[in-house]
């Protein structure tokens, strides 16, 4: 089933806390579901997301057998999801701000905080054009379209900090499909502009100058992402935040970025390289600041 009118948003406005009841609520709204292992993302059915259904009898049987099963929802048929990651290797939030500034991520239907502190933005699938799933690990942004699935609220993931819940934190207005191809193109490094990772043991002035020159030459659309990548490399090499700012700010300014944005991106890069647990900043605050909405 595909949404033929993107303005018709099928996601339930209220979800029961019990997982089995929530699975029924999704199905009643026309969203197919399937069970995943409690506290995990692994499907419990033989064919995974291909077994998803809105059949209440089958759903009752699944959650009768696995009452704590997480709720899996296939993507690419009714909904697509932009997944912004937060983990020890980095965060996708600086890239999210770039995507917002470029006008590429508006018109989402709902925003979901993930257990890691990341963000899922839900969009209606474009009935005219199927878009496959893809990942941009360095940008910490993934797209879940055809051939993918997501774990939906109120599911939980078991972490070293206990059980963390997927939670709807905001709902959009007049949802429209997202141009995932344009986002992927923006996040794809330009040929000839990649650099080898910086080795902390061999960091020297020439390496810093090379990174700065690379940042200064970044084209519009890749500037913020490139600055974030370069700042992460220097942070990983042990350079203090103020020194990173001093090394990269002139180059980023020459590329066309504003001073406040440069400082925020470098700060985010240093925080991302030193994360040891879950982030303290609520995702809801980021969503409100990005999109000017209330909870």
Image: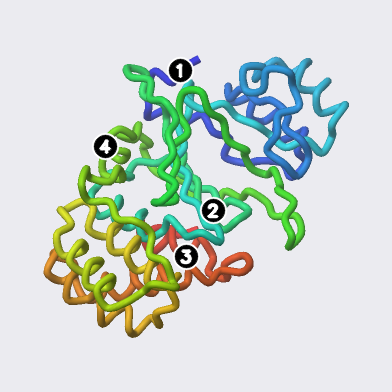
Q: Which residue has dot 3 on it?
A: 285
**Residue 223 occupies quadrant:** bottom left
**Residue 104 location in percent, x, y?**
28, 44
Q: Which residue has dot 2 on it?
A: 169
Kindly identify the residue that appears in the image at 40 percent across and 82 percent down. 240
> Are the residues flagged by discs 4 and 1 in contact, CB closer than 8 Å?
no
Which residue is at the front of the view, 119 or 86?
86
Judged left or right of residue 128, residue 240 is: right
Instruction: Tell me how far mark 1 sits from mark 3, CA to CA.
Output: 32 Å
**Residue 283 location in percent, x, y?**
51, 60
Per the image, label 2 sits on a secondary structure element best described as strand
| 218, above or below 184, in the image | below
Earlier residue among tags 1 and 3: 1
Choose mark 4 or mark 3, whichever is in front: 4
Per the image, label 1 sits on a secondary structure element best described as loop
Which residue is at the front of the view, 47 or 244?
244
Which residue is at the front of the view, 3 or 225?
225
Earlier residue among tags 4 and 1: 1
Q: Which residue has dot 1 on it?
A: 2
Extreme residue in the front direction: 202
Earlier residue among tags 4 and 3: 4
Earlier residue among tags 4 and 2: 2
Q: For label 2, count other residues whose C-alpha is less than 10 Å away and answer few (under 14), some (14-19) or many (20+).
A: some
Q: For label 1, count other residues whose C-alpha is less than 10 Å away and answer few (under 14), some (14-19) or many (20+).
A: some
Kindly identify the residue that appears in the image at 44 percent across and 62 percent down. 286
Extreme residue in the right direction: 65
Q: Which residue has dot 4 on it?
A: 182
Kindly identify the residue that appears in the image at 61 percent across and 69 percent down. 276
Instruction: Tell me how far mark 4 sits from mark 2, CA to CA.
Output: 26 Å
């Amino acid at each position: 089933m595909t949404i033929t009118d993107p303005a018709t948003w099928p996601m339930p406005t209220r979800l029961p806390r019990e997982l089995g009841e929530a699975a029924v609520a999704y199905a009643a709204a026309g969203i197919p579901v399937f069970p995943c292992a409690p506290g995990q993302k692994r499907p419990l059915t033989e064919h995974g997301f291909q077994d998803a259904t809105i059949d209440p009898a089958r759903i009752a049987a699944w959650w009768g057998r696995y009452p704590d099963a997480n709720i899996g929802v296939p993507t690419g048929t009714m909904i697509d999801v932009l997944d912004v990651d937060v983990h020890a290797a980095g965060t996708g939030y600086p890239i999210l701000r770039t995507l917002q500034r470029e006008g590429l991520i508006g018109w989402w239907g709902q925003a979901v905080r993930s257990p890691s502190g990341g963000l899922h933005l839900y969009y209606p699938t474009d009935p005219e054009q199927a878009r496959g799933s893809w990942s941009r690990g360095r940008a910490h942004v993934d797209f879940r379209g055809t051939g993918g699935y997501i774990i939906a609220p109120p599911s939980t993931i078991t972490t070293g900090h206990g059980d963390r819940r997927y939670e709807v934190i905001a709902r959009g207005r007049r949802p429209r499909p997202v141009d995932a191809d344009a986002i992927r193109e923006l996040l794809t490094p330009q040929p000839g502009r990649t650099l080898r990772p910086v080795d902390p043991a061999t960091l020297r002035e020439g390496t810093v100058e090379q990174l700065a020159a690379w940042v200064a030459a970044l084209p519009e659309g890749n500037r913020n992402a490139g600055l974030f990548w370069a700042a992460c490399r220097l942070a990983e090499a042990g350079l203090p935040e103020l020194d990173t700012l001093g090394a990269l700010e002139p180059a980023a300014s020459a590329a066309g970025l504003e001073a406040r944005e440069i400082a925020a991106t470098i700060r985010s890069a240093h925080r991302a390289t030193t994360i040891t647990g879950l982030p303290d900043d609520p995702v809801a605050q980021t969503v409100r600041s990005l999109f000017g909405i209330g909870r």
